[in-house]
Amino acid sequence: EIGKTSKEEATGFGHSHGAGAGAMGGEGNPTDLSEMLAEGTKESHDRAENCQFVKDFLRGHIIKDVFKRATVALYFVYSAMEEEIEKNKDHPHIAPIYFPAELHRREALARDLEYFYGADWESQISLSAGTKPYVDRIHEVGEADPVLLVAHSYTRYMGDLSGGQILKKVAQRALKLPASGEGLNFYQFEGITSHRGFKQLYRSRMNELELDPEAKQRIVDESNRAFGFNMMVFSELEEIGNTIKEEVQEQVFGHAELIQEDDF
Ligand code: HEM
């Protein structure tokens, strides 16, 4: 979905699942959590969009092994997040944004990993150093401060519902993955027909949470932290990509003594 400037709330997409207060009314209330998050994470979003790994990815410059490792990282992140959400699903700050059938990605990611690594995928993957702090933080907030899971859910799921479709097409083309969608289940939200409509519902649910201004601000801060953790994962993936490229260079050009002038 391009068109970040369009005000989705203003379209009145016809969702009335919740009481709906936050999902209508053109400009949105600046004290609504959804507005505070959108506004308060703008800079983080800009930074994320402009980091090298993401820019390379968008250009279709992605190495299959790196894409597989990205899928592994996401698997660990979503496993942690969804485990903590499940534990807290009856918590008054989590229940309204609990949408396992629509949002949860762990199983989709497991299918993608089975496609990439085969039946014994579980024995082949491990939690990377760049992903561990993110996973640890999710467990920490799930245990000690579950309201902050709202921030982690928002940061990932709303992002997936926004930029995800672009990323899917880019990956499909660059990696020549089958049109059937194998390897890309993560990007396919089977339980959601309208991404835009669902995002409106999710925003309105966030806005109905009973939260004082301080708690809202802590959620915005935690979302910015979550963006930071995502950037750490991207940096690690970028480094792995660079290492692979150097190795290829080495294989091609490294053995100068074997290359004759007239080989060119
Ligand atoms: C929203 C694109 C990276 C998290 C959006 C929107 C677009 C977009 C177009 C606006 C959708 C709308 O108005 O409803 C992209 C592109 C990216 C990227 C092209 C680069 C590949 C990321 C990353 C994250 C992220 C890395 C975090 C991990 C979010 C969130 C929103 C969002 C949380 C919802 C903002 C809100 O309405 O409150 N993204 N994004 N995005 N994105 Fe991204």
Image: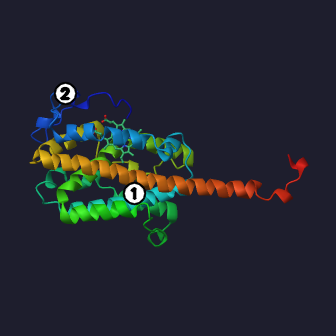
The disc placed on residue 28 is none
* Helix, strand or loop at mark 1: helix
CA separation in Å, label 2 and label 1: 33 Å
- Label 2 vs 1, first from the N-terminus: 2
**Which residue is at a point 42% across and 59% down the rendered structure image?**
73
Q: Are marks 2 and 1 in contact (CB under 8 Å)?
A: no
- In the visual, does 175 lie left or right of 202? right
The residue singled out by tag 1 in the image is 74
Q: Position of residue 29 (x, y in %)?
A: 15, 33
| Of residues 86 and 73, the one drawn nearer to the viewer in this rendering | 73
Q: Residue 173: name its quadrant.
A: top right
Above or below, comparing residue 86 to residue 28 in the picture: below
| Residue 102 visible to the viewer | no
* Helix, strand or loop at mark 2: loop
- The quarter of the image holding the C terminus is top right
| Of residues 37 and 100, the one drawn nearer to the viewer in this rendering | 37
The residue singled out by tag 2 in the image is 27
Identified by mark 2, the residue type is Glu
| Of residues 108 and 147, the one drawn nearer to the viewer in this rendering | 147
Above or below, comparing residue 2 to residue 176 in the picture: above
Labels in figure, total: 2
Q: Residue 141: name its quadrant.
A: bottom left
- In the visual, does 85 lie left or right of 232? left
**Which residue is at a point 15% across and 28% down the rendered structure image?**
25
